[in-house]
Image (cartoon, rainbow, N blue to C red):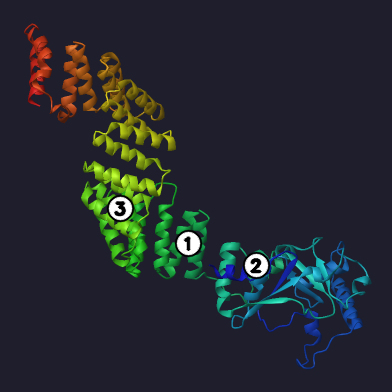
């Protein structure tokens, strides 16, 4: 919690309160006139001025101000007193603010070696001026406190400070005091400036205030590293990441600090434009140089390396994070993802198992472990961990989808379809689920249902070629080879280097005895990906070979024979 928030929590509940900040808590809650009246008297001899003394003093002050032409014709005597009070004249007014944070600033701005105080006063306990008065009657009840809300013609400074006043010839004894510790004054001022934009410039918004802020008593101000760090943090939380980075850099220029480097790495990753990952990694490495036990820096650096597909470096970073914090669930889980990126699925499973030891009820570890089991064709284990993931998060479709894929791997197509249906119930707009369900229907030779599933997948993702390719296979299963060819052509249109689509299209052309087109498709398939026809059997080519042999002996025939030989050899 911030130090300002700590003091905010001490405020009484409800409304109607006003606040006064004093940089020395030992001062009484009295007007500057009262202190001036007792200026040469010891604390034991201080006395209460009479009502006549009070009135005579203020009338003289007002007349003197007017004789110096310090007045505005439209201001009443009371309003003139308010201006004089804010420009430093001693009056019977006591400044308060409707804003606690403004009062807090005044409690911290000076007397750095003394505890300050914020006085909290319930304005409903004080008599009120209902409106400004322009005659001697403003002194008629000065023997009691009177509350003045300056919601009339006031100067910029009063407006900026949300000023209200208590007026009267007596001390204020019924206010609650919140003690402000001297050791926290500097940090409070930093937070008020960085978070709430409350500082001298915002509170003294007139030419006199400007001159005061820039007079000889005020040294030329240079922010500390801590202030720049705080500024960076506030910009980060406001989503102004470029400004945050600039502030962190300034903090680092003054004093290199692990938090500034680490937070700068976070800010770089949050930029909306292209992220400069080199700068992110550099920042995390600098944080680690300063504090080698910064496990979060290693952890985040692992995430960056994973995004860059630098999985070996990611794994190394996660291992360092785990050395520092052996119970860091996320490091194990993400290390599993990095091993998956390397195709080391057994290692990935070991990492996921460790993550589950730390957090036994975490959906992500079970789900991703299920994917690794599937990649290893260990479909039975995949089904079991997917079931566990579903127990933990029954409303997520991914685990149902993966479980369906694993059931299909076990040739349990009905169970697979049931899992896919559950996934669709949760998320009816998932391309992969419909595509996989179509595959399960093909496994059951229910080609019409398969085609419907593939069509639904295509509705969701019309620019993916797998569903078109699979739909072509389903049409071929129904011996509707023309429709199959149209589907394969669409798959190739989307992905021109799909050798599998060319090969299966060649088979459909063969079934239609369109041997020339079949040979062209097979040649293209072999040029793109010879692996797709490696399991072809000799008898598949009998009809094609007969057609070629019956052709006239030309160069074209020799080309066809060459293609056929490649088919047989593959």
Q: Which residue is mark 1?
A: 247
- Cα–Cα gap, marks 1 and 3: 26 Å
Which of disc 1 and disc 2 is earlier in sequence? 2
Residue 443 coordinates in the image, percent (x, y): 26, 28
Q: Which residue is mark 3?
A: 305
Other residues around mark 2 within 10 Å, as few (<14) / some (14–19) / many (≥20):
many
| Secondary structure beneath label 1 | helix
Q: Is residue 463 above or below residue 70?
A: above
Q: Is residue 351 above or below residue 177?
A: above
> In this image, 351 relative to 229: left or right?
left
Can residue 83 be seen in this snapshot?
no
Q: For the residues carrying marks 2 and 1, which lies nearer the camera in this image?
A: 2
The image quadrant where one finds the C terminus is top left
Dot label at residue 307: none
Which of disc 2 and disc 3 is earlier in sequence? 2
Residue 562 coordinates in the image, percent (x, y): 8, 19
Dot label at residue 101: 2
Residue 191 coordinates in the image, percent (x, y): 56, 67
């Amino acid at each position: 919690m911030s130090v300002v928030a700590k003091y905010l929590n001490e405020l009484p509940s409800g409304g109607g309160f006003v606040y006064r900040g004093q940089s020395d808590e030992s001062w009484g809650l009295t007007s500057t006139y009262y202190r001036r009246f007792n200026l040469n008297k010891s604390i034991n001899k201080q006395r209460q001025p009479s009502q006549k003394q009070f009135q005579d003093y203020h009338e003289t002050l007002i007349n003197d101000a007017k004789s110096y032409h310090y007045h505005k014709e439209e201001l009443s005597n009371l309003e003139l007193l308010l201006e004089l009070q804010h420009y430093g004249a001693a009056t019977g007014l006591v400044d308060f603010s409707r804003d606690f944070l403004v009062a807090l600033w005044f409690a911290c701005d000076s007397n750095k070696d003394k505890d300050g105080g914020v006085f909290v006063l319930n304005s409903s306990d004080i008599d009120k001026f209902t409106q400004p008065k322009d005659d001697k009657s403003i002194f008629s009840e000065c023997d009691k406190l009177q509350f003045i809300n300056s919601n009339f013609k006031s100067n910029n400074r009063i407006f900026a400070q949300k000023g209200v006043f208590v007026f009267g010839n007596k001390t204020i004894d019924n206010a609650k005091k919140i003690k402000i510790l001297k050791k926290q004054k500097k940090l409070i001022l930093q937070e008020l400036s960085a978070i709430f934009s409350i500082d001298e410039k915002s509170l003294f918004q007139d030419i006199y205030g400007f001159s005061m802020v820039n007079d000889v008593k005020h040294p030329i101000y240079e922010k500390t590293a801590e202030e720049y760090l705080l500024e960076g943090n506030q910009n980060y939380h406001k989503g102004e990441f470029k400004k945050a980075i600039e502030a962190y850099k300034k903090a680092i220029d003054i004093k290199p600090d692990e938090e500034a480097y680490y937070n700068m790495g976070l800010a770089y990753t949050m930029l909306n434009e292209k992220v400069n990952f080199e700068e992110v990694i550099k920042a995390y490495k600098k944080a680690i140089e300063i504090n080698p036990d910064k496990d979060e820096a290693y952890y985040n650096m692992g995430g960056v390396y994973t995004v860059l597909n630098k999985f070996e470096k990611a794994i190394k970073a996660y291992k360092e994070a785990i050395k520092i914090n052996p119970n860091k669930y996320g490091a194990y889980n993400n290390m599993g993802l990095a091993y998956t990126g390397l195709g080391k699925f057994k290692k990935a499973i070991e990492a996921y198992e460790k993550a589950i030891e730390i957090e036994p009820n975490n959906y992500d570890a079970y789900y991703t472990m299920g994917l690794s089991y599937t990649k290893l064709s260990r479909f039975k284990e995949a089904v079991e961990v997917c079931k566990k993931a579903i127990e933990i998060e029954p409303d997520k479709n991914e685990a149902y989808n993966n479980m369906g894929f694993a059931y299909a791997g076990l040739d349990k197509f009905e169970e697979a379809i049931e899992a896919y249906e559950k996934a669709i119930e949760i998320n009816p707009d998932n391309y992969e689920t419909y595509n996989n369900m179509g595959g399960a229907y093909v496994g059951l030779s229910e080609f019409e249902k398969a085609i419907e599933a593939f069509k639904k997948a295509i509705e969701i993702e019309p620019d993916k070629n797998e569903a078109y390719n699979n739909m072509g296979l389903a049409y071929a299963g129904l011996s509707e080879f023309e429709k199959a060819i149209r589907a394969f052509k669409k798959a190739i249109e989307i992905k021109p280097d799909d050798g599998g689509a060319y090969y299966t299209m060649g088979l459909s052309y063969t079934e239609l005895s369109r041997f020339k087109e079949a040979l062209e498709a097979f040649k293209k398939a072999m040029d793109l990906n010879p692996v797709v026809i490696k399991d072809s059997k000799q008898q598949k080519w009998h009809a094609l070979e007969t057609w070629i042999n019956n052709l006239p002996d030309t160069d074209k025939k020799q080309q066809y024979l060459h293609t056929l030989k490649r088919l047989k050899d593959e």
